[in-house]
Amino acid sequence: MKATTRFRHVFLHSNAGRVALAAIPFLALVPSTAKAEVPQPLTVSDASVGRTIATGAEHACALAPSGIVYCWGRNDQGQLGLGFTSSQESVPVSLGLTDVVSVVAGGQHTCALRSDGTVWCWGANPKGQLGDANLSPKTTPSLVAGLSNIRQVTAGKRTTCALTTGGAAYCWGANDLGQLGAGLQSAYEPAPQLVGTGFRGVYSGSSANHSCAIDGSGWVYCWGDNSAGQLGNGFTGGFEDSPEFIPVFEDFLNLEQPVAVTTIAVGAETTLAFSAEGSVPYIWGFGPYTYNTRPYPWYEERGAVAISVGNEPACTVSSYGRAFCYGRVDGHLPPPNALQNATTLSEGAEFGCAVTAVGDVYCWGNNDYGQLGTGCVGDGCQAAPPTIPVAFGGVAIASNSTPDVSTSDYHSCFKAADGAVKCSGYNASGQLGNGTTVSSTSPVDVVGLPAGSTAQVVAGTYHSCALKVDGTVWCWGRNNYGQIGVGTLGGYYTTPQQVPVSDAVQLSLGKYHACARTAHADVYCWGLNEGGQSGAANLAPQPSPVLVDGDYRNVGVGQFHSCAVDYYGNLKCWGRGSSIGLGTNQAATPITVPLPAGTSDVRASWQNTCAIMGNGALYCWGRNVESQLLTSNPAPESPVQIGLIGNVSQVAVGAQSICAQPAWSTKPYCWGANNELQLGQNITDRTLVTGNPGLVSNPTYSRSLSGHGKSFCSFGTDGDTRCWGDNGEGQLGIGSTADQAAPTPMLP
């Protein structure tokens, strides 16, 4: 584990019941690699994928897009809403409640918001947290009286809060630590109490005795328990029984204007927030550092797109879907490579759950009450990930892995529905990995990568690599420049060979080189190095991995260059100068690309590179002959903002064209050359070159987008991978070698 000691801020105040902290050092921790339970995907009977997840102290609930709620775990207080109490239910069970738009879990109670604006709660009720004055538990959903036009509901350890469409916040339940925020002296209140008006969001957590709200200007207010400085008011100890303004500053050298906050995550002793200005979360209370009694920028997590806090761990999701957790609960955090493509996290007392982009629900940690939903009770009762693909809602995808497809110039590789890795296309160098050199227009199985074993697969021009869930890296195919990474030059390998890199979490391949990023933020590269793209100063081929200087949270590799995003959101690139803005020069060590602060993702191909900022802005640079940069400048070396398409959620960079999915759309748009029909717009004119982004024809809702060379692929919500463009070697895996002008489903 890497750690650097730094100092935060100094407070010299003292008040009765409060302790001011002075010059507290903290440890900035790299994600723990301690052994932990591998997250398991859950199965329920609903025919559609999961949408939201909520974790209580020892139970969890998930909401399907159909509006049906499923719950599992501890049920001694009726917190599962099944009409009875029991010690536990170890598999998800549906409630009779319908038309639900959100579900939240408190310590031992659960609440749901229905589409008609009403709130329904069930489970433990000793402090009136269900909104019922009789204080007895309820095993079925009960309407909270006195509320209407509710648009948000949130649950604390023993309290519940709701926000109306008009911005009024109400709380009810325990109040011994001022949790209701209504300025009351009573120990509890079962009826909703007005906290204040003018709010646009209210937030609590199942382990928390405090809550926070955001007003119309994006400013933060918190109330309740402050034993660990979790209110962010500069003190520890005591509590606040009414909302207190908590200024969130970009840094403590500029205290003139607080930044606007967009969302908050609340844990037992920790609070996290996202600002509207960028992708840096702010943290206060107890967290990965020691105690921060004021909101402080968590620069190590720059680029995060989702946050969650539980009893002790704080978790983030990166822009590329990787989930990392930090905290004191060793053994109850997901392994660095076991969870990918996450979109939503929720942390309970000693367990957590996440929903992936395709709706899989994964849970990890303590399982004393079956809260992992795997059908068994107790830690370690399921020693290995299931080999049969299971998914929330019955959508078959690869267990413990991201729906993944990677195209190259002449072949492609992907993970099939059963989790096995398959490749198709040109195979003269064994790049299909099936032990032969026979090309195939239909997908063939890669030897040694069985179902459920692989986290990511990537195709280079004449080689391929896979990242296993255990963090090991395996490559196969042509090795003329050492791109297989096994210490030798020349020849080829028709089956996967292990590369000496451990704890890997991300792979990216160029034409003749490859790079891997580890859970420790290291980047290693190997293969062709004529421009320094593998990170060695001597420019000779590198048959073994070379450690690149710096700490990184994302990596993207082009044909003759490599790029990575560091922990401060800066984009660093190295390799051929024409690809990284150095003209005819080259750089074997990373140089900073002139971009706005807050880069979250990078993608590279032949002569182009694109970066997505934390706010979704897209910048690209390099070749512009085919109007890839949507500018009249023939070859700008500095990044150009692709403003015509607006902010984007993902991008794929081809040899002469680019595809991106706008943040406002569920489908991709492409622009540039169409010489191999790679625009995917059902246009057969191969002379077309366009600087006008066009909607790809007939795609389903795109979960992930990939591209390389003159082919692109999209993974849809229906579980199919559809590809278009160049298919001269059968690389699209459709059973023929005909180019495709519109997305065409891959064969299984």
Image (cartoon, rainbow, N blue to C red):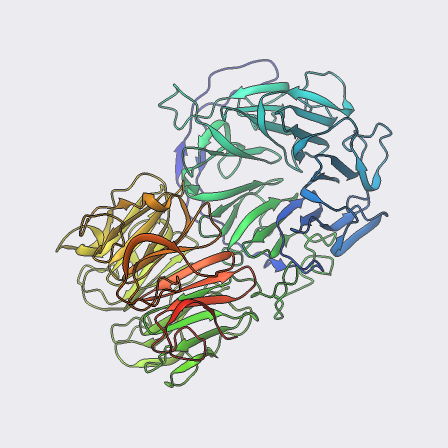
The answer to which quarter of the image holds residue 249 is: top left
Q: Is residue 704 visible?
A: yes
* 279 sits to left or right of 392: left
In-image side of 711 versus 170 (left or right): left
Total labels drawn? 0
Front position in the image: 654 or 43? 654
Left or right? Give the position of 324 relative to 571: right
> With respect to residue 238, does 661 lie above or below?
below
The image shows residue 722 at horizontal and vertical percentages of 47, 66
| Residue 472 in view, yes or no | no
**Rendering coords of residue 679 (x, y %):** 35, 61
Q: Where is residue 323 in the image (x, y as percent from the top left)?
A: 51, 50
Please report the residue visible at 43 percent of the width from the left and 68 percent of the height from the top. Answer: 466
Q: Is residue 96 above or below residue 122?
A: below
Report x, y in % for residue 181: 66, 21
Quarter of the image where one finds residue 149 = top right
Closer-to-camera residue (111/590)? 111
For residue 457, side relative to residue 230 (left or right)? left
Query: Which of the 4 image quarters holds residue 626?
Result: bottom left
- Where 442 falls versus 591 (above or below)? below
The furthest residue to the left: 584
